[in-house]
Amino acid sequence: MATYKKRGGKPRTQAEKMDHIEDESTTAEVFSTLDEGASRTEAWVEKNQKAILIFVGVIAISVLGYLGFQNFIQEPKEAEATNEMFQAQSYYEQALTATSKDSLFNLSLTGGEGKFGFLDIIDNYGGTNAANLSKYYAGIAYLNTGKYQEAIEYLDAFKADDMNVAPIAKGAIGDAFAQLDQQEEALKYYEKAASMSKSELTAPRFLLKAGITALGLGKKTVALKHFKAITVNYPKSPEATKATLYEGKAEAVK
């Protein structure tokens, strides 16, 4: 294809004229192709305009609906549920240090003084953080009052990402299974609780329970693994001394 030293210069020779005509033809072809492509796009948009508008409308309604739900429904519901839960939490906290625990734990579950208990919060404020947290409280309350199946049900339904609370909930399920004399299930939950976090508050606690449970099941190797994990990784924990004693006991088992 010909080139010109000066932009806009006129072709002088026959060859240059032919090249110039070819260039113009190619340019026209390119624009023609673009026009055809644009026309096809416009035609497609025109043909599917109704579907496009519906799709965009659905997206817009979904976004606005979500924002409206959060601002006008969910947030007020969360605030109301948290306020309602205050009395139940008060009973629960009193029960932890009281001599007679059962009556206070039961009040925390069913409510008192005209206020909801944890079970009411769960039933009336589903989908809120307060309802989810109430499942944890209810599970622990049932565990402390000897209702182990109910404890397992509510603790298993509780969802948490916290590095301390989540393992405690799983470990409490292990405690409930241990009370039901389902030691294999108890061991599984203790091991799961221990693996969920490396926190010194929870990991050595549930490793020790796992080790003791495994030893009771005659699983010497498993028990030793858990005891050693405590003495190696958590030597300053309160459980370390007990782990050392149990380690010696496990090694003595033939």
Image: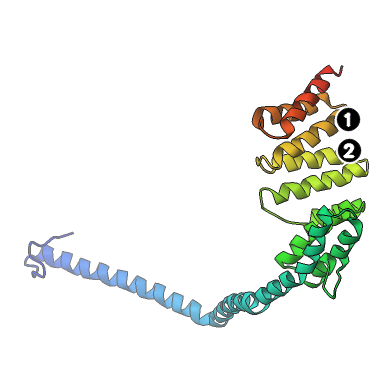
- Extreme front residue here? 99
* Pointer 2 residue: 183
Q: Nearer the viewer, residue 33 or 59?
A: 59
Q: Nearer the viewer, residue 144 or 2?
A: 144
**Identity of the amino acid at label 1?**
Gly
* Pointer 1 residue: 216
How many residues crowd mark 2 within 10 Å: few (<14), some (14–19), many (20+)?
many
Q: Is residue 173 visible?
A: yes
Left or right: 178 as drawn, with respect to 160? right
- Residue drawn at x 45%, y 75% is 41
Q: Are marks 1 and 2 in contact (CB under 8 Å)?
A: yes
How many residues crowd mark 1 within 10 Å: few (<14), some (14–19), many (20+)?
few
- Residue drawn at x 81%, y 19% is 251
Q: Residue 174: percent from the left, percent from the top?
A: 83, 44
Label drawn at residue 89: none
Q: CA distance from mark 1 to mark 2?
A: 9 Å
Q: Is residue 188 above or below residue 128?
A: above
Q: Quadrant of residue 127?
A: bottom right
